[in-house]
Image (cartoon, rainbow, N blue to C red):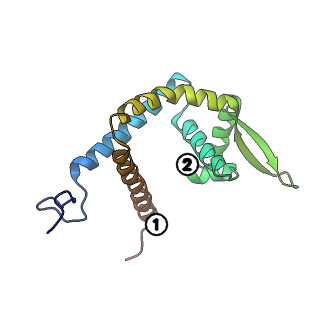
Amino acid sequence: MSDPSAPRPEAGRPENAAPQELVRLLQNFTLEANHYVDAAGGRNDMHRTDLNALAVIMRHSAAGQVVTPGVLRTELRLSSPATTALIDRLHASGHVVRERLGTDRRQVQLHMTPKAYRDGSAMFMPLALRMGKAMAAYSAEELDLVTRFMTDMVEATLAARQEATNPEPN
């Protein structure tokens, strides 16, 4: 006998197809998160690309990885001139410092400043507080399930992006 609480495919829908309402909710979440980033960044005279760059620097730094202009260029899919302009903006606003690496001193590493952490906290704390309040209504088990689900959705999105970027020849 099957477990009645086990997820079942919807009638008339292939087993591996995503439920459309859930996909729409994920799309709406992404859109609203983007709107929040635009609003919070705009109030602080920062472009979305600036905030994305700081997120890249923060993620790599937390993992103990060196962040160079090349890393930003690759991750944000920018041209070299656009990357230079981005770093110049972040440096001028006091959010990033450049540090020369190695003995030849040609390699530049990027670091976020304490100001970047303060400004980022001020911009995103209202969102974090509201999300925390919303999450408080869920049990630890439910949050574990949602965490697993969101991790899987991120991995699926990364895989789809790679397929879109590098389609296999027919």
Q: Amino acid at mark 2?
A: Leu
Residue shown at 42% from the left, 68% from the top: 167
Contact, mark 2 vs mark 1 (Cβ under 8 Å): no
Give the farthest residue toward the top: 43
Relative to 104, 91 lies left or right: left
Q: Circle 2: is it few (<14), some (14-19), or many (20+) Cα within 10 Å? A: some
In what element is the residue under mark 2? helix
Q: Which residue is mark 1?
A: 166
Q: CA distance from mark 2 to mark 1?
A: 17 Å
Residue shown at 19% from the left, 65% from the top: 14
In what element is the residue under mark 1? loop
Residue 156, x across and y down, in percent? 39, 59
Say whether residue 41 is visible. Answer: no
Residue 123, x across and y down, in percent? 53, 27
Give the farthest residue toward the left: 11
Instruction: Count all numbered tags in the image, as a single digit.
Output: 2
Depicted 154 relative to depicted 51: above or below: below
Q: Amino acid at mark 1?
A: Asn
Q: Which residue is mark 2?
A: 76
